[in-house]
């Protein structure tokens, strides 16, 4: 797993961060005032600049989504570090992260979301998952290790357990482990926007021995945390959004 890949791509990463910061600025300003919103944007960018040389890149044709998740994780750690320095709580930092992801996903092309859903539940995907599940195959990509299972369509269609997670490894390396259970909740905004039908009840960051992703076509996002403070924040966000 290459940790120098993004050095030459720093400008592009910073442009992406600034777009996200601009989208979330109104939310931050409403909570904490315009002055703090401006200061936070600068602080997060400085934190992110320090993280970029340490960001891992997973090689391989199947690693696109994993790399996207790692980039999101790096941005969220930057927010956490900046807000912690300002005396903000983990929950406050996460609410900013959640809103930023939600707003970014509003810009995600609907045709692409439909295409991703079609691929996830296609016959070819089920065939591939069934073959891996039958072989009890474990797939290793960078710091990620996964095992697959096929469902009967009742509780879930197919699933994947993460036995090792590159996102968690990066978070630990950056000294942000206390924020890890919150970062795992990024999948709420992503799942809602993409219509993944994702169901998850445990994560490595919560102290479990694996993350249990299950996917059911047409299902609502059902993600919970075994860390009480994180679950309280999830419930608060759901109440605030009217879900």
Image (cartoon, rainbow, N blue to C red):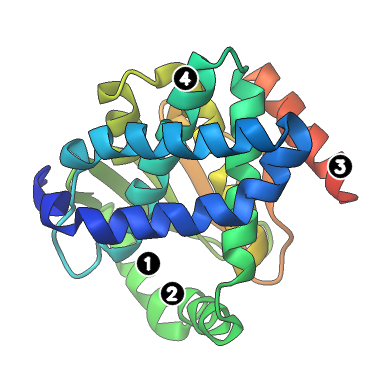
Q: Position of residue 32 (x, y in %)?
A: 72, 30
Dot label at residue 207: 4
Which mark is first along the chain, 2 or 4? 2
Q: Secondary structure at mark 2?
A: helix
- Residue under label 1, please give it: 129
The reply, left or right, for residue 114 in relation to residue 236 is left
Q: What is the C-alpha distance between the residues marked 1 and 2?
A: 5 Å
Dot label at residue 126: 2
Which mark is first along the chain, 3 or 4? 4
Q: Position of residue 215 (x, y in %)?
A: 57, 60
Pick whichever, 194 or 215, lies toward us: 194
Q: What is the C-alpha distance between the residues marked 1 and 4?
A: 26 Å
Q: Are marks 4 and 3 in contact (CB under 8 Å)?
A: no
Which mark is first along the chain, 4 or 1? 1
Q: Which residue is drawn at the image coordinates 59% and 29% (left, top)?
A: 93
Pick whichever, 164 or 28, lies toward us: 28
Q: What is the C-alpha distance between the residues marked 2 and 3?
A: 37 Å
Q: What is the C-alpha distance between the residues marked 4 and 2?
A: 30 Å
Choose mark 2 or mark 3, whichever is in front.
Answer: 3
Q: Are marks 1 and 4 in contact (CB under 8 Å)?
A: no
Q: Position of residue 125 (x, y in %)?
A: 40, 76
- Residue under label 3, please give it: 240
């Amino acid at each position: 797993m290459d940790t120098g890949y993004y050095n030459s791509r720093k400008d592009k990463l910073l442009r992406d961060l600034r777009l996200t910061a601009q989208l979330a600025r109104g939310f931050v300003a409403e909570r904490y005032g315009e002055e703090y919103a401006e200061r936070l944007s600068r602080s997060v960018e400085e934190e992110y600049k320090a993280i970029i040389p340490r960001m891992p890149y997973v090689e391989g044709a199947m690693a696109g989504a994993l790399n996207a998740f790692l980039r999101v994780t790096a941005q969220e750690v930057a927010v956490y570090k900046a807000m912690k320095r300002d005396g903000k709580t983990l929950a406050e930092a996460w609410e900013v992260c959640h809103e930023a992801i939600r707003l970014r996903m509003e810009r995600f092309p609907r045709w692409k979301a439909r295409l991703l859903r079609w691929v996830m539940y296609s016959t070819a995907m089920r065939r591939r998952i069934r073959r891996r599940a039958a072989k009890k195959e474990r797939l290793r990509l960078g710091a990620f290790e996964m095992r697959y299972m096929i469902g009967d369509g009742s509780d879930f269609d197919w699933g994947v357990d993460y036995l090792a997670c590159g996102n968690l490894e990066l978070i630990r390396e950056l000294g942000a482990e206390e924020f890890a259970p919150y970062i795992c909740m990024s999948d709420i905004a992503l799942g809602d926007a993409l219509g993944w039908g994702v169901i998850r009840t445990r994560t490595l960051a919560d102290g479990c021995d694996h993350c249990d992703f299950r996917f059911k076509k047409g299902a609502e996002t059902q993600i919970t945390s075994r860390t009480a403070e994180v679950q309280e924040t999830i419930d608060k966000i759901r109440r605030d959004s009217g879900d």
